Image: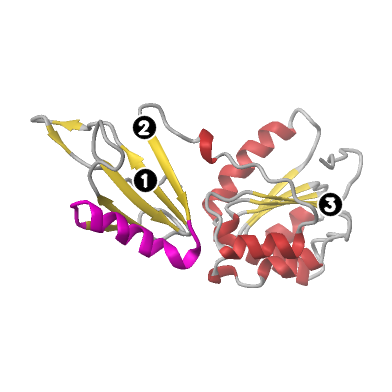
Amino acid sequence: MVPVDPRKDVIQALVIVPTRELALQTSQICIELAKHMDIKVMVTTGGTNLRDDIMRIYQKVQVIIATPGRILDLMDKNVANMEHCKILVLDEADKLLSQDFKGMLDHVISRLPHERQILLYSATFPLTVKQFMEKHLRDPYEINLMEELTLKGVTQYYAFVQERQKVHCLNTLFSKHDGAPRENSGVRGASVVAAVVGDVSGGGGPVVAVVVSSLVVVVRLQSIRRGGGTEELLVGKRRE
């Protein structure tokens, strides 16, 4: 990984996130870490005073956490000089590559040096992420944590399918088991359909099938007891 040199008074790393809230959360962690490394961190997002950001960026800044629109504004005004920025981190890349930010990342990357390192993090792997990797990443090293994300007390089963096959896959589960589908829009940046489909592989507890982007997830839930001993299926909202 390319290191950030605290002796150089230039922007060396750029972290792009899709929302202002996530930018603020990320910057808080980066600022705490930077205290021990003598590195200056700046956060810039939409909804704040652009003039203030311009004044701050003219001071010593080596790492920037930003939302796409604001960092492009600073680049287009020739305020954010990216000639020495060799690290680009894209958090929640599936959201950054959605229609909401269409073309913005291509614009950002065009302003970076040819020799650079891109770190891409994504909870899902839609075609947009795959196409972006093929276009901008050279010999990327992929780390898949899917098999390590099982929560305590929960057994998960995954079926990798093509984008166009996900609804058919879920319908197949419905056709084999009782249960009416439930729609839930609580997961940011993804269309989710959930249904209690019964016991897929035998033994213990209800099963929920979830379609998120190009991934179908079948999760076996342990019995969730509430109040008078009734069972409930909880499909929760992911925290920001």
Q: Amino acid at mark 1?
A: Val
Picture disc at residue 154: 2
Q: Amino acid at mark 2?
A: Val
Point out the stretch of residues depicted in magenta.
Answer: 161-180
Front position in the image: 220 or 63: 220
Q: Are marks 3 and 2 in contact (CB under 8 Å)?
A: no
In the picture, measured across the screen, residue 98 lies left or right of residue 229, that is right
Residue drawn at point x = 73 percent, y = 44 percent: 41
Which residue reaches farthest left? 228
Q: Nearer the viewer, mark 1 or mark 3?
A: 1
Residue drawn at point x = 72 percent, y = 68 percent: 106
Q: Secondary structure at mark 1?
A: strand
Q: Residues within 10 Å of mark 1 (few under 14, many from 20)?
A: many
Mark 1 — residue? Answer: 218
Picture disc at residue 86: 3
Figure quadrant of residue 109 = bottom right
Q: Nearer the viewer, mark 2 or mark 1?
A: 1
Q: Position of residue 3 (x, y in %)?
A: 84, 39
In the picture, measured across the screen, residue 46 lies left or right of residue 192, that is right
Q: Position of residue 77 (x, y in %)?
A: 78, 71
Which of marks 2 and 3 precedes in the sequence?
Answer: 3
Q: Quadrant of the N terminus?
A: top right
In the picture, measured across the screen, residue 219 lies left or right of residue 198, that is right
Q: Position of residue 86 (x, y in %)?
A: 84, 52
Which residue reaches farthest right? 7
Which of marks 1 and 2 precedes in the sequence?
Answer: 2
Q: Residues within 10 Å of mark 3 (few under 14, many from 20)?
A: many
Q: Between marks 3 and 2, how big is the CA–CA gap?
A: 40 Å
- Is residue 119 visible in the rendered image? The answer is yes
Measured along the vertical axis of the image, is residue 83 above or below residue 164? above
